[in-house]
Amino acid sequence: MSQDCFLPDGTVRVSETVTYYRYVPQKIYEIELALNYLNDDELIKVMKYISRITDKRCTFRSLQKPMSAKQLSRAINRLNNK
């Protein structure tokens, strides 16, 4: 049964359902499920742990301190000088 909605301006809003399948290894699937149950503090702990066990091969931008205005202007100047 369709979920079509006829509007007074002569258009029809059609609702469609798209099914997309992706295949992932079971370990990845279980890790993704566990991540859904963590709160923000626990997620940060997991991100720090991942960075530590990978010897910083994997880093997360959200764990980095934000740039100060002074650092930002220096970085922009360096880019402009190149």
Image: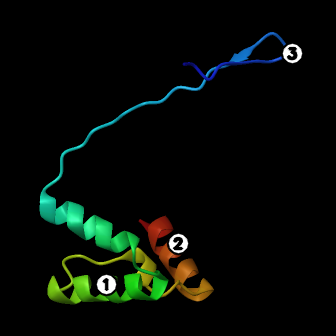
**Label 3 secondary element:** loop
In the image: residue 21, left or right of residue 62: left
User: Taking 17 as reference, is 31 left or right?
Assistant: left
Q: Earlier in the sequence, mark 2 or mark 3?
A: 3
> How many numbered marks have been drawn onto this rendered protein structure?
3
Task: Check the image and report above or below for 4 versus 64.
Answer: above
Cα separation, mark 2 vs mark 3, equals 53 Å
Which is nearer the N-term, disc 1 or disc 2?
1
Amino acid type assigned to the residue bearing label 3 in the image: Pro
Please, is residue 28 above or below residue 19 in the view?
below
Q: Which mark identifies residue 76?
A: 2
Residue 33 is tagged as none
Query: Could you tell me if the residues under marks 1 and 3 are in contact, i.e. CB atoms within 8 Å?
Result: no
| Amino acid type at image mark 1 | Val
- Measured along the vertical axis of the image, is residue 66 above or below residue 9? below
**Residue 60, percent from left and from top:** 35, 76
Distance between the alpha carbons at the discs numbered 1 and 3: 52 Å
Provide residue 15's location: percent of width, then percent of height: 59, 26
Circle 1 Cα neighbour tier, 10 Å, few/some/many (<14 / 14–19 / ≥20) = some
> How many angstroms separate mark 1 from mark 2 (CA)?
33 Å
Front position among marks 1 and 3: 3
- Give the residue drawn at x 57%, y 19%: 2
Callout 3 crowding tier (Cα within 10 Å): few <14, some 14–19, many ≥20: few
For the residue pair 49 and 19, the one nearer the viewer reads as 19
Between discs 1 and 3, the one toward the N terminus: 3
Q: Which secondary structure lies at badge 1? A: helix
Q: Amino acid at mark 2?
A: Ile
> Which residue is the site of mark 1?
46
**Left or right position of 23 against 46:** left
Quadrant location of the N terminus in the rendered image = top right
* Residue identifier under label 3: 8
